[in-house]
Image (spheres, rainbow, N blue to C red):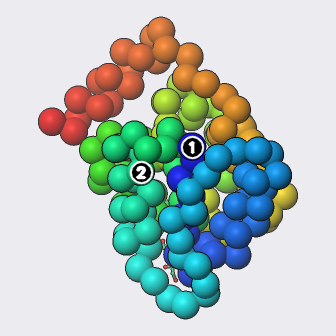
């Protein structure tokens, strides 16, 4: 299960990505927003991050104008490792090495076709463990 959400700045891209998830056969939960009216990105980040930390969704996708506000909010949640990606290589590596569980995107920054490719890399790559496991554990110890 993939949790996806956006504010008004990411709404257009989020809608495109929802269609993409559907076409690719992913199970997803659309956490809003559902129109272009202004909303506060922390509220949506909270819903998507809770989906992930509570185990209802394996991964999350958050879109705002730049992706940065969503990223900052997501990384304040215990258990979340959110990665801001503007390219496919980073999306692949952040799953393989950082075990990122939330992807953040800038709806006013990346075009729809690139965004779909970034999402594809994020969703199809797996954490490699091994030496990266130790590093992720060290990273997560900063939460305490
Ligand atoms: C909303 O105008 C904008 O601030 C938001 O979408 C996002 O870019 C924040 O980081």
Q: Is residue 105 above or below residue 91?
A: below
Residue at 65% across / 39% down in the picture? 122
Q: Note whether residue 117 is visible.
A: no
Q: Position of residue 42 (x, y in %)?
A: 37, 70
Q: Is residue 90 above or below residue 141?
A: below
Residue lying at 49% horizontally and 14% vertically, measured from the top left? 129
Task: Locate residue 105: give its quadrant.
Answer: bottom right
- Judging from the image, what secondary structure is the residue with disc 1 in? loop
Q: Position of residue 21 (x, y in %)?
A: 73, 52
- Furthest toward the bottom, the residue is 37
Separation (CA) of disc 2 from disc 1: 9 Å
Residue pointed to by mark 1? 1
Report if residue 105 is visible in the image. yes
The percent coordinates of residue 6 (x first, y second) are 55, 69
Q: Which mark is residue 46?
A: none
* 46 lies above or below 90: below
- Secondary structure under badge 2? helix
Compared across the picture, whether 32 is left or right of 69 comes to right
């Amino acid at each position: 299960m993939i949790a996806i959400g956006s504010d008004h700045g990411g709404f257009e891209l989020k809608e495109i990505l929802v269609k993409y998830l559907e076409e690719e056969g992913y199970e997803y939960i659309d956490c809003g927003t559902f129109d272009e009216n202004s909303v506060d990105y922390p509220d949506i980040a909270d819903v998507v991050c809770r989906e992930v930390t509570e185990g209802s969704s394996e991964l999350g996708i958050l879109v705002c104008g730049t992706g940065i506000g969503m990223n900052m909010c997501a990384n304040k949640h215990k258990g979340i490792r959110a990665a801001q990606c503007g390219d496919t290589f980073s999306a692949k590596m952040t799953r393989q090495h950082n075990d990122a569980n939330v992807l953040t995107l800038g709806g006013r920054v990346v075009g729809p076709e690139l965004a779909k490719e970034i999402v594809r890399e994020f969703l199809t790559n797996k954490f490699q463990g091994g030496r990266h496991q130790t590093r992720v554990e060290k990273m997560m110890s900063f939460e305490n």
